[in-house]
Image (spheres, rainbow, N blue to C red):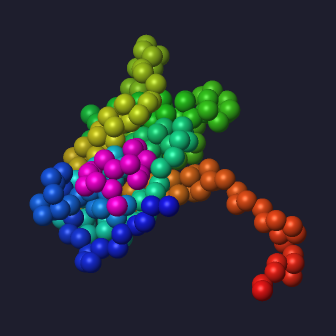
């Protein structure tokens, strides 16, 4: 099991990449340090989609709010796995949050991302085609113009499926949309977006872990365990 290092002091996070710790640290660079990996903003200790969201949030929040992210850094260390729905989920989660406050021109691509991710998740989960989660319906209700545009686009085109290669594009559009918003609650939205994503990944990836091996003999009979 990889040892998680404990820092000597609380880090001061800053946006962007940093070649060395002396130049500063972003969220994922400090995660790489805690995981005992080579200094990088793309460490192997965290699922690539979650790491991409963390980098986007780190770079998008204000300097004042960035300190609120520090307590979340240890939570992403070790959050990695092969569950195929996680890429779809992270794109959907970010688009749902951003579309509510993004400018209308940015809402269109976010509405399209929501519809495509929902379609593919419905297929993966065995839901009826065209069904949509409550969160997505509510998000699209807040952007009716973008929803209509996306519906028209899908009638005429067949966009590429949501894959790791274009999840990054969805996240980038979500971050841009939030940054372009005039909402006074952008920082709270961004911090909450990352926090809830971490919680979701923890739940999904914990379910992937194999059950503990059974103890020899009668495992539930503690009296049968020899102590001397």
Q: Is residue 42 left or right of residue 180?
A: right
Principal SS element in the magenta part?
loop
Dividing the image into 4 quarters, which one contains the C terminus?
bottom right
Residue 187 visible to the viewer:
no
Residue at x 35%, y 73% (from the top left corner): 6
56 or 11: which is nearer to us?
11
Q: How many numbered marks appear?
A: 0
The part of the chain drawn in magenta is 36-50
The image position of residue 164, as x and y in percent, is 41, 34
Q: Quadrant of residue 158?
A: top left
Residue at x 31%, y 47% (from the top left corner): 42
166 or 26: which is nearer to us?
26
Q: Is residue 215 left or right of residue 122?
A: right
Residue 41 visible to the viewer:
yes
Query: Is 130 located above or below residue 48 in the figure?
Result: above
Query: Is 168 located above or below residue 25 in the figure?
Result: above
Q: Quadrant of residue 33?
A: bottom left
The image position of residue 51, as x and y in percent, is 36, 49
Residue at x 18%, y 51% (from the top left corner): 17
Taking the magenta stretch, the answer to whether it contains residue 39 is: yes
Taking the view exactly as shown, the residue that stands out farthest to the front is 228
Query: Is 93 located above or below residue 105 in the figure?
Result: below
The image position of residue 181, as x and y in percent, is 24, 49
Taking the magenta stretch, the answer to whether it contains residue 102 is: no
Taking the view exactly as shown, the residue that stands out farthest to the bottom is 228
């Amino acid at each position: 099991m990889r040892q998680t290092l404990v820092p000597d002091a609380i880090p001061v996070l800053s946006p962007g990449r940093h070649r060395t710790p002396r130049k500063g640290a972003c969220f994922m660079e400090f995660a790489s340090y805690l995981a005992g990996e080579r200094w990088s903003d793309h460490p192997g200790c965290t699922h690539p989609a979650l790491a991409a969201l963390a980098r986007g949030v780190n770079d998008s929040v204000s300097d004042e709010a960035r300190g609120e992210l520090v307590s979340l850094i240890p939570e992403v260390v070790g959050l990695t796995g092969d569950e195929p729905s996680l890429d779809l989920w992270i794109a959907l989660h970010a688009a749902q949050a951003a579309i509510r406050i993004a400018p209308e021109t940015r809402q269109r691509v976010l509405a399209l991302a929501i519809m495509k991710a929902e379609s593919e998740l419905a297929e993966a989960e065995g839901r009826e085609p065209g069904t949509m989660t409550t969160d997505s319906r509510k998000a699209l209700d807040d952007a009716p113009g973008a929803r209509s545009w996306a519906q028209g686009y899908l009638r005429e085109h067949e966009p590429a499926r949501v894959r790791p290669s274009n999840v990054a594009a969805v996240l980038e559009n979500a971050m841009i949309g939030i940054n372009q918003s005039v909402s006074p609650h952008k920082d709270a939205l961004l911090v909450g977006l990352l926090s809830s994503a971490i919680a979701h990944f923890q739940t999904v990836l914990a379910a992937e872990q194999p059950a503990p091996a059974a103890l020899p003999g009668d495992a539930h009979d503690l009296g049968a365990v020899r102590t001397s």
